[in-house]
Amino acid sequence: MNSFYLILGSEAALADRALAKLSAELKEEKCEITNLFAGDVIVGDIADALAPSLFSERRAMIIRDLQDLPEDSKDEITRYLDSPDPSTTVVFVHKGGVKGKGLLDAIKKIKPELIACDPIKKEAEKEEFVRNLFLDLKRKATPGAVSALVGALGNDLRELQSAIGQIAADAPAGTIDEVMIDKFHQGRVETTGFDVADATLDGNLSGALIALRSALETGTDPVMITSAIASSLRSLAKVSGVNRSVKSFELAGQLAMAPWQIDKARRQLNRWSPAQIADAVGAIAQADAEVKGAASDPIYALEKALTRIASSQRA
């Protein structure tokens, strides 16, 4: 392993993953690991952690929230940077920003292995994050399962992380698919957003409103509901552009969807024109902005969007 690592960025879930992987590697090398939280250290803690070990050939120090390190402890790090011990690995974790920038710049000068943890915003990046988390746990997931999780929980990567850990532990051996996601995580995926989405896209307004109220009463975040509807609309848009004579299992890889998702979207498309899909996308985008703070009553914003989308389809 390298002597220095810098985990840098504000995306806590990415930092957690990077730190877990590094910690596992350090344990495999039988390192004596000292974990410190920068805001809690007192003078001498860092120097002690970096001193040669009497009991182990290799040593490691992980210091988290480096931006919070007290001023009187910073010189313990800068002195060490000038004369590092080759048998010791140091992992710095910094959330980015200007706080603690002087020390951060000094660390960068020694060219540590940098692990960037910038916020993830694109759906494709979130899906890659989910796939990697499953692989970390020695599990594989279908594209449909990954999309379902991102659609339901993609606004909170920490929550995604927790859900994946639970699913990987509970699901039987083999590839994790959408059925397993529904079974083991239905409180977040199936019952919450996607029941509302299915009823809405089927033109069943009364069913959509009942499902919406049920989901909200059980604690579902309105953002998860707009996310599920948006995900279902994206599926419609994807499927609308392909030849209906091509079998769904042949399209699964191309569209990054499960065959059953393609079949469902094709059934729903019988009620939709391209203009109606575009209008629905606009409606749910507006609702999403409103439930995230632009409206005083997010529940009314959701009901208005569901009514507009479900009522605008052709019979």
Image (cartoon, rainbow, N blue to C red):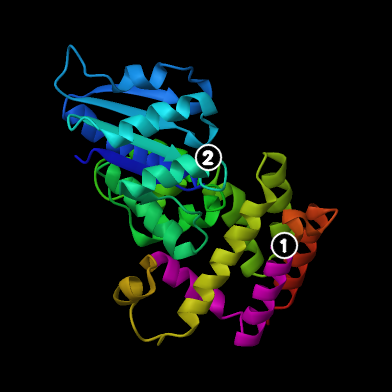
**In terms of image quadrants, where is residue 197?**
bottom right
Of mark 1 and mark 2, the one earlier in the sequence is 2
Q: Which residues are magenta?
A: 260-288
Q: Looking at the rendering, in which quadrant would you find the C terminus? A: bottom right
Q: Helix or strand or loop: what does disc 2 sit on?
A: loop
Q: Position of residue 138 (x, y in %)?
A: 24, 43
Q: Of 80 and 175, which appears nearest the observer?
A: 80
Residue 272 lies within the magenta run: yes
**Extreme residue toward the left, this view:** 57
> Measuring 44% from the left and 32% from the top, which residue is drawn there?
64
> In the rendered view, would you say 162 is above or below 155?
above
Residue placed under numbered mark 2 in the picture: 100
Q: Is residue 1 magenta?
A: no
Placement of 46 over or under 213, stated as above or below: above
Q: Is residue 185 visible?
A: no
Residue 289's tag is 1
What amino acid is found at the position of numbered circle 2 in the picture?
Gly
Taking the spot 58% from the left edge, 59% from the top edge, the residue there is 228
